[in-house]
Image: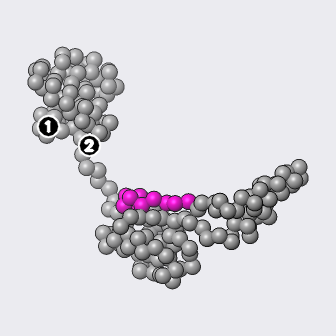
Amino acid sequence: MHSKKFSKTLQGLIRKCKDAKERERLRALYALSIGYPLSLVSDIFTVDEGTVYRWVDRWKKNKSLSDLPKMGRPGLLKDEDKELLRELVIGGDPRKFGLEADFWSTKALRDCLGQNDIRVSQETIRRCLVEMGAVYLKPEADKSRNESIDRIMEGRKVLAPYRLNPRTLSLIFDGPAFEEQPRKAGWVLEK
């Protein structure tokens, strides 16, 4: 394992490696290749000597130290379900699908998928959307409502000495002023 060519190969792989765990394993092999004793390498990388031996064996067999595929429960959404989810988000308006919603939230998507006998959690839908590259846009305040916002802030200052719950203040002042304008929010996915 002590060769300059092997050390150069490892240096190049370390520079290109994007996975932190694999990069650390490669660094341990590099330390061995330039002459560090196995006991010192295991101390530096805080692993057992047996672990370093396994890394060396894996390198000799596979020329790779990347993580092995993980076993686990298969995903709940099939490929055709994911495609339907993609079409729903790209399609835009949930009202086209009989839902009373202005934008696609994970709840609205779950309800729509439920109409097609696909039962999954909102978190599963969120993870799937993130994997697809979708982003969630939060509602934006309309700039033309500065007067309403100023009125709300003044009202909060007047009522602050009475120690009202901030949520109560929001209900008193935020309600009608902010409901007049349509909200721009929901999951967005490029075609």
Q: Quadrant of residue 49?
A: top left
Give the class, few, some or many, for how many residues have Cα within 10 Å of label 1's Cα (few <14, many ≥20): few
- Quadrant assignment, res 12: top left
Report if residue 135 lies within the magenta region. Answer: yes
**In the visual, does 145 lie left or right of 120?**
right
Q: Is residue 19 above or below residue 127?
A: above
Tell me the amino acid under the disc marked 1. Answer: Lys
Foreground: 33 or 51?
Answer: 33
**Spatial distance from mark 2 to mark 1, Cα to Cα?**
13 Å
Quarter holding the C terminus is: bottom left
Percent from the top left, x then y, of residue 116?
Answer: 41, 80
What's drawn in magenta, residue-wise?
129-138
| Coordinates of residue 71 in the picture (x, y in percent) | 29, 53
Q: Which residue is mark 1?
A: 63
Q: Is residue 188 above or below residue 38?
A: below
Dot label at residue 67: 2
